[in-house]
Image (cartoon, grey):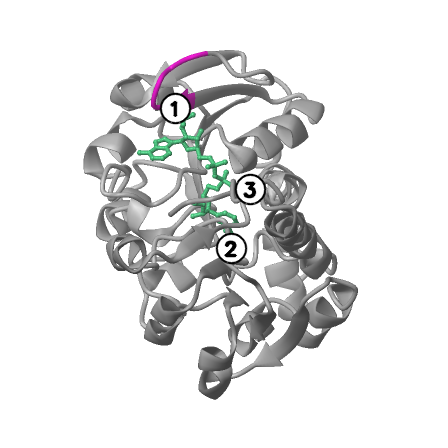
Amino acid sequence: FELERLGIHDSVDAVFPPSELATHLADLPVAVDVIGDDEIAACDAVVTLEYREAFLELDWIHSIQAGVDRFPFDDLEAEGVVLTNSTGIHDRTVGETVAGYLLAFSRRLHDHVANQQERRWERPEWDEAFTLPGNTACVVGTGTLGRGVAETLGALGVRVIGVRRSGDPVSGFEEIYANDDLLEAVADAEFVIATVPLTDETHHLFDADAFDAMREDAYFVNVARGPVVDEPALIDALESDSIEGAALDVFEAEPLPEASPLWELDEVIVTPHCAAYTRDYFRDVGEIVRENVGRLESGDEAFHNRVV
Ligand code: NDP
C-alpha cells in the first residue's frame, strides 16, 4: 500500500507527548501528524496506544506497547490491516524495574519509604534484610522482557531460570523449563517473575495451584498483564502467608480499584503499569516505526514486529 499520512494518535499521551514522536519522525518521507479520533479517516496508518474501530479502515496500525491483547486480531485480518507491536525495546527498562522491586524487598526500601511518610525512625527486624546472590529467580516468558530481567538480575548475582513454551535453552538462563512444567519450575525459586504475553494459553497461568507450588518465602512479580494471574487466588496466597509478598505493575482491572486489598497488604508493592517507562520511550518506538516506513518505501512489505 501507499503510505502518505501517518497519524500519531493522541492516546499515546499516556506514555509520552505525541508531539515528541511527531517531531522525531518529521524527516520521514511521509506526512506525520498528531491526530485525535476525528482525524483517523484522513490517515493511512497510525501509531497508537489504544484501539479504535475506525482503525479498521487503515492499512497499518503500530502499537506503542509490546502487548497487543486488546486488538481484535480477527477483524484486523479480515479487513487486511497490518498490526505491528513494540516488542524488543523493553528489556532494560523492565529489567531495571524488576531489579528495583527485588532490591526493595531484600534491602527493605519499601518499608523505609512507608516509614518516612510517617516520620518514623524504625529499623528492620534483625532477620528481615538479606542480599540477592544465592537466590533464584524463575522468569516465566523468555522474550525481550524475560531476557532483560535475566541480564539485570544476573548482574546482581541472582541465579536465573526460565519458562517458555518449547523448553529450549536461552542464553542468560541457567535452566529452562517448558510451560507444562511450570509448577516444578517455580517450586525452588525465591522470586517468580511473570513476563509472558497475555493469550488464551497464558490467561490465569498463575492460579491457586501455581501459588501453592511456590515457596512460603517466595515473592511473586507481575510485569506482564493482569489476567495472566488469577487475582483472587494471589490475594488468598498473600493473606494466608502461603507466599511472602508481591510486586505488581499490572492488574485484572486498571487503574487498580480503590477497594482492592492489594493496596494495603504487607510486602506488596503496587506500581501503576509503568515498568517500561523511560524518557527515551518515544525514541525507541520511533526507531521501529522508522524501520517499517523504510521497508515500505523500498517496496519490502515484510514488516518488522508484525503481529497480524
Ligand atoms: P516477546 O514476544 O519478546 O516474548 C514472549 C515470551 O513469552 C517468549 O519467551 C515466549 O515463549 C513466551 N511465551 C510463553 N507462553 C507463551 C504463549 N502462550 N504465547 C506466546 N508467548 C509465550 O514479548 P515481550 O517480552 O516483549 O513482552 C512480553 C509481554 O510483556 C507483552 O506481551 C506485554 O503484555 C508485557 N509487557 C508489559 C510491560 C509493562 O509495562 N509492564 C512492558 C512491555 C511488555 P517462546 O520462547 O516459547 O516463544
Residue projecting furthest to the bottom: 38
Label 1: element kind: strand
Residue situated in front as seen by the camera: 34 or 157: 34
Is 60 located above or below residue 189 in the figure?
A: below
Q: Is residue 115 visible?
A: yes
- Tell me if 186 is positioned left or right of 303 in this view: left
Q: Work out whether mark 3 precedes mark 1 in sequence or the reverse, and give the earlier one.
A: 1
Which residue, given by chain and number where applicable, does mark 1 sit on?
Answer: 164
Amino acid type indicated by mark 1: Arg
Q: Which mark is residue 304?
A: 3
Which residue is the site of mark 2? 65
> Which of labels 3 and 2 is toward the front?
3
The dominant secondary structure in magenta is: loop
Residue 274 in percent (x, y) is at 56, 58
Report the mark closest to the observer, 3 or 1. Answer: 3
Q: Which residues are magenta?
A: 163-168
Ligand 1 closer than 8 Å to label 3 CB: no
Q: Nearer the viewer, residue 87 or 109?
A: 87
Tag 3 and tag 1, C-beta contact below 8 Å: no
Residue drawn 54% across the image and 61% down it: 2
Residue type, label 2: Gln
Q: Residue at the right extreme?
A: 27
Q: Please tell me which residue is depicted at 33% across the width and 62% down the height of the picture.
A: 261
Distance from the alpha carbon under mark 3 to that under mark 2? 14 Å
Q: Is mark 2 within 8 Å of ligand 1?
A: yes
Please tell me the numbered disc located at residue 177: none
Earlier in the chain: of badge 3 and badge 2, it is 2
Where is residue 189 shown, x and y percent of the image? 44, 23
Mark 1 Cβ and ligand 1 under 8 Å apart: yes
Structural crowding at the residue carrying mark 3, measured as other residues with C-alpha within 10 Å and reported as few (<14), some (14–19) or many (≥20):
some
